[in-house]
């Protein structure tokens, strides 16, 4: 038994009676007890609930009931996904004591599939950041070097998965917040097509860009989780009413004839040479498997970051107006009047990066600036999207680095906003175009993981997963155990 | 365009944010740094591009006019910062 | 000072609550009068992570209103966020339509004192209502500590349409007539139940003055949220007088927002509004556009009833009603329906109209009855008018029967039979009464013989009185003439 196994192996082990869901949950909780003092992946742990859910799964199995596809598998949720009766803080002081009265749709579906929730993971406050240092509570460490950041904003989910605290976790990705931490911690992270997974119950950062997706140690695990959470949700107007294909059967290992474009621009943009060469080597592996690889160009990509830093803050400034201290969340004490209640509650409740983005977003939407900034950025967004559409007319997939660099040291970028923002230069364009993309481990630079990003057409997650899976199967050397989890790697392989 | 200290104050008032005096200059500098990055958009020829508010090909995502479950005040006011019976409350304000 | 005359231009913004079962973006019931904060859910409370989904019926009612006003429904309209902080606005923004409203253009006409009037409609758009704040005494009654305002979100998210007119109205009376006509139209189309006392129709007014004939438009002043038609009229009258006095004294009128004070009948400046509002509208990324194709519009258009204006014209041409009769009988859709069914049952149109706008209106008023729950129906009136025409009932008796039918719902024929009310047709009996009356009133009898026609009316009345109203006045008339003529 080991909670470090893959979903199918753990499910088979439970089905064969080798171990129970309760034993699996206990083992995962023990591992968290051992590791999380150094990692700080979790904001909230839910051990009683986890054990009760696991016991329910075991009982159902004993009664011979049909179990859900994720029954008994220990997992975690990024703490910006609402859980009824469980704290949902967004790693913000504003929501430090916030207990939602309802569940996010993605979580509802996982729970119905038998998921065992161990807790809620740390993030950059309201998902704004690339290092999980912007959490109001504490930073999260990278399992490969706890002195380094795990990326962000889904850094807690990535660290929990990479260290084996959980089998998989959900994250959210607005500009790279699933893929970049997946790359920096050496796991697989999938951002589905915008609208593929319901956003209902995902606390909004930038609504036109946010998307929920899985982080796991294998591509197949990501496929299994996506299978459960994908699909139309009548509670989300922006959810696509499209049928969900069967993802696991598409993991054939066969990429022969698959056309993969390599956008030249994604190897500029401050990409570390060692990262670039590992990614290029990874693309060569796919070529060796029979994919047809060719260079291509996405010329507007250079401006995607600029457009993003108008559009995302603009939406955020509106989405975060509700944290006003009126009927829930942090309220400053001693405010003499309403205006003071507003400004002091928000001053105290929101962190520096969040306030900076609210300020920026308010500015670009304000009278006199709307056309020059907001509308202009929307026009550039259209061009970025058109670039992708054109390239994906020729190619089935595009391949690039996920992150320009490997994990950096905690505090290293604190004074350099723009350098921090550059961490998402390769992932942001994909969000602007609403396309699906996956990050898979493709090697190590200075002992730290590097990620290969594959970008697909609208709703073409199956193709994405197939290529990522084939690559993963061909490169077992990149499936390593972080030193911190060493000695506990029994069962790591799938 | 350059964000001045006055711009920061104007925008902070709109956003109901407050900053300590010593943070204002720094914030203005940060905003200018980011807007410096953003200003490169001026170099992009967008004459042929319509503003894109959403990547979705969707229209008319409707619900039918059917009642759904409501919340009990205790469900959502449990952690209310100030509460009187079924009401949240704020310091008395003048109705506009 | 003195004789400067001003042209007044008034534009209205009317917020109308739509007659849906549920709110605009969530399934909470939109009914009025529930215990505070019980008609709420994560969506209308704006709880983190919740998302709006548009109520199809609200869109349809909005389209119906637009069609009734002759507005052009946009092929595609878009919801935007209007960002501002207010305690009754839990998301920190209101979802409304801004750059791309549901419909534009259109007009509304009505019969003014000096002839037909028309005001143009600028736009019709959908938006959500805000919650309600309780202050001072209201808050204290609800148990609030001193110095606190309480919030009730039951209304929050209730669907509204905002109808904006061009500044085509020229007087407070004009504005009021427009509002009355609009209310009638909205009730006709079932777009709203237009209950003013429940706030389901609220109004802001813009008013500007300029010297008569001047080309330069005046400075508009906005009067916020006046909650009755009477107060709209009063607020405008006050405001016009105030502005005229300022202009006449050589002072400029400030562009501002003012609030009507019911207690004093005056308006006063809302200084807080003068701090420039900047709503930072942008398309709401949580919603997708509303696309309305011609088939949808046509199917809704087909579901509209014949509207008051068309109906008035038809009643005049088809049934020969006067303008006033037509206006009265079309005041509400149920009344117009009553009228048409009565006519269809064979009644004379003008007779039917007069009974409805006369007797029925009087009884509804006298008994404070609900016009939508009438016990008397068109069949009753057809029957009654038949009895009247056949001479079975006199007009005074018919009114009595009508009232009883109104109160009990019994058929007029049954009432007549049960109470023995039918006219006496026994001429020998009537002739005896005539003799008795002539004997008792020799003066008037002599006057009639001397050529005073009027004296006959008095004598007829006396016979009617003697028979308890059961005599047929025509018969009495004939008998009296025969009798007096024979002697003469």
Image (tube, rainbow, N blue to C red):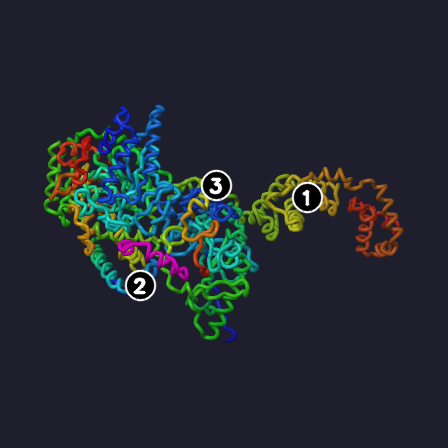
Magenta stretch, residue numbers: A332-357
Quarter of the image for residue A196 reads top left
Task: Choose between B22 and C38: the one closer to the eye.
Answer: B22
Task: Determine whether C138 is above or below C393 in the image.
Answer: below
**Residue at the spot 20% in from the left edge and 29% down from the top edge:** A252
Q: Are marks 3 and 2 in contact (CB under 8 Å)?
A: no
Is disc 3 surrounded by few (<14), some (14 to 19) or many (20+) residues within 10 Å? few
- As helix, strand or loop, the secondary structure at mark 1 comes to helix
**Residue C283 picture location, percent across and down:** 34, 50
Q: Name the residue under label 1.
A: C407
**Residue A331 picture location, percent across and down:** 38, 55
Task: Choose between A195 and A373: the one closer to the eye.
Answer: A195
Q: Name the residue under label 3.
A: C302
Task: Choose between B83 and C238: the one closer to the eye.
Answer: B83
Q: In this view, does C139 lie to the left or right of C405?
A: left
Using the rendered image, report if marks 1 and 3 lie on a common chain. Answer: yes
Q: Mark 2 points at which residue?
A: B9
Whether A189 is among the magenta residues is no
Q: Which chain carries label 1?
A: C
Is disc 2 surrounded by few (<14), some (14 to 19) or many (20+) residues within 10 Å? some
Q: How far apart are marks 1 and 3 (CA)?
A: 36 Å
- As helix, strand or loop, the secondary structure at mark 2 comes to helix
Task: Choose between B54 and A311: the one closer to the eye.
Answer: A311
């Amino acid at each position: 038994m080991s909670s470090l196994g893959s979903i199918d192996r753990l499910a088979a082990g439970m089905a064969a009676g080798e171990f129970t869901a309760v034993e699996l949950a206990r083992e995962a909780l023990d591992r968290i007890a051992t590791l999380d003092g150094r990692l700080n992946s979790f904001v909230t742990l839910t051990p009683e609930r986890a054990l009760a859910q696991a016991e329910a799964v075991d009982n159902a199995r004993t009664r011979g009931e049909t179990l859900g596809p994720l029954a008994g598998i220990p997992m975690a949720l990024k703490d910006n996904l609402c859980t009824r009766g469980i704290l949902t803080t967004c790693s913000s002081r504003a929501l430090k004591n916030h207990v939602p009265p309802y569940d996010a749709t993605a979580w509802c579906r996982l729970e119905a599939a038998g998921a065992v929730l161990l807790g809620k993971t740390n993030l950059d406050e309201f998902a704004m950041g690339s290092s999980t240092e912007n959490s109001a509570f504490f930073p999260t460490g990278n399992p490969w070097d706890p002195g380094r950041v795990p990326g962000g904003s889904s850094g807690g989910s990535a660290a929990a998965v990479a260290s084996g605290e959980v089998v998989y976790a959900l994250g959210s990705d607005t500009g790279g917040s699933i893929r970049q931490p997946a790359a920096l911690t050496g796991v697989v992270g999938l951002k589905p097509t915008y609208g593929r997974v319901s956003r209902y119950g995902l606390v909004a950062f930038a609504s036109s860009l946010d998307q929920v997706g899985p982080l796991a140690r294998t591509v197949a695990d990501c496929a299994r989780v996506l299978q459960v959470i994908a699909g139309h949700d009548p509670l989300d107007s922006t959810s696509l009413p499209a049928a969900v294909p069967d993802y696991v059967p598409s993991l054939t290992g066969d990429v022969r004839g698959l056309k993969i474009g390599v956008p030249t621009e994604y190897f500029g943009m401050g990409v570390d040479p060692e990262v670039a060469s590992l990614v290029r080597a990874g693309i060569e592996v796919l070529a060796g498997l029979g994919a047809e690889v060719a260079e291509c160009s996405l010329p507007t990509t250079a401006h995607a970051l600029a457009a993003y830093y108008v559009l995302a803050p603009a939406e955020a400034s509106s989405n975060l107006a509700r944290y006003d201290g009126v009927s829930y969340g942090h309220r400053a004490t001693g405010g003499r009047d309403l205006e003071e209640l507003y400004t002091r509650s928000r001053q105290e409740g929101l962190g520096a990066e969040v306030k900076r983005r609210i300020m920026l977003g308010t500015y670009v939407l304000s009278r006199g600036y709307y056309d020059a900034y907001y509308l202009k950025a929307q026009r550039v967004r259209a061009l970025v999207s058109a670039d992708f559409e054109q390239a994906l007319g020729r190619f089935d997939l595009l391949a690039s680095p996920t992150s320009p660099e490997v994990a950096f040291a905690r505090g290293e970028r604190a004074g350099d906003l723009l350098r921090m923002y550059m961490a998402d230069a390769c992932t942001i364009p994909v969000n602007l175009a609403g396309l699906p993309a996956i990050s898979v481990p493709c090697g190590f630079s200075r002992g730290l993981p590097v990620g290969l990003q594959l970008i697909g057409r609208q709703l073409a997650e199956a193709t994405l997963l197939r290529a990522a899976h084939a690559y993963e199967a061909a490169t077992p050397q990149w499936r390593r155990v972080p030193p911190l989890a060493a000695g506990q790697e029994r069962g790591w392989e799938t | 365009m350059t964000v001045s200290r006055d711009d920061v104050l104007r925008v902070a008032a709109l956003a109901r944010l407050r900053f300590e005096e010593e943070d204002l200059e720094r914030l203005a500098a940060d905003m200018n740094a980011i807007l410096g990055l953003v200003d490169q958009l001026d170099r992009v020829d967008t004459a042929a591009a319509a503003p894109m508010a959403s990547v979705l090909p969707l229209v008319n995502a409707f619900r039918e006019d059917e009642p759904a479950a409501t919340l009990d005040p205790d469900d959502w006011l449990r952690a209310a910062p100030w509460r009187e019976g079924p009401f949240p409350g704020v310091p008395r304000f003048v109705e506009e | 000072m003195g004789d400067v005359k001003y042209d007044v231009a008034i534009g209205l913004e009317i917020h109308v609550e739509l007659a849906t079962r549920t709110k605009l973006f969530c399934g909470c019931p939109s009914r009025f009068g529930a215990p505070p904060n019980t008609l709420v859910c994560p969506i209308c409370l704006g709880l983190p992570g919740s998302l709006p989904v548009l109520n199809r019926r609200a869109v349809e009612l909005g389209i119906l209103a637009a069609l009734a006003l002759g507005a052009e429904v946009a092929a595609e309209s878009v919801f935007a966020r209007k960002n501002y902080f207010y305690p009754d606005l839990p998301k920190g923004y209101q979802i409304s339509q801004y750059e791309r409203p549901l419909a534009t253009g259109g007009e509304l006409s009505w019969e003014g004192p000096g002839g037909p009037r028309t005001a143009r409609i600028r736009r019709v758009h959908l938006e959500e209502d805000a919650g309600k704040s309780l202050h001072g005494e209201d808050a204290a009654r609800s148990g609030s500590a001193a110095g606190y305002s309480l919030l009730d979100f039951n209304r929050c998210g209730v669907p509204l349409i905002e109808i904006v007119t061009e500044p085509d109205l020229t007087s407070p009376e004009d504005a009021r007539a427009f509002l009355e006509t609009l209310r009638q139209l909205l009730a006709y189309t079932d777009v709203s139940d237009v209950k003013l006392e429940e706030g389901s129709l609220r109004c802001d007014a813009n008013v500007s003055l300029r010297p008569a004939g001047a080309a330069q438009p005046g400075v508009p002043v906005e009067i916020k949220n006046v909650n009755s038609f009477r107060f709209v009229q009063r607020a405008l009258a006050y405001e016009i007088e105030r502005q005229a006095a300022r202009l006449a004294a050589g002072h400029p009128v400030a562009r501002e927002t003012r609030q009507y004070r019911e207690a004093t009948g005056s308006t006063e400046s809302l200084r807080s509004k003068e701090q420039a509002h900047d709503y930072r509208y942008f398309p709401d990324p949580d919603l997708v556009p509303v696309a309305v194709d011609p088939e949808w519009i046509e199917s809704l258009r087909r579901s509209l009833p014949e509207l008051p204006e068309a109906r008035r014209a038809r009643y005049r041409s088809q049934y020969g009603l006067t303008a006033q009769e037509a206006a009265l009988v079309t005041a509400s859709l149920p009344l117009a329906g009553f009228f048409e069914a009565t006519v269809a049952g064979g009644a004379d149109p003008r007779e039917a109209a007069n009974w409805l706008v006369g007797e029925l209106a009087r009884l509804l008023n006298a008994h404070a009855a609900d016009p939508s729950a009438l016990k008397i129906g068109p069949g009753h009136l057809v029957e009654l008018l038949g009895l009247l025409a056949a001479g079975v009932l006199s007009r005074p008796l018919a009114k009595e029967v009508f009232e009883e039918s109104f109160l009990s719902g019994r058929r007029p024929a049954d009432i007549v039979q049960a109470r023995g009310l039918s006219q006496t047709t026994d001429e020998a009996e009537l002739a005896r009464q005539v003799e008795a009356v002539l004997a008792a009133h020799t003066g008037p009898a002599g006057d009639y013989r001397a050529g005073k026609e009027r004296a006959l009316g008095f004598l007829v009345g006396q016979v009617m009185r003697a028979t308890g109203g059961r005599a047929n006045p025509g018969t009495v008339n004939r008998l009296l003439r025969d009798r007096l003529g024979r002697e003469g």
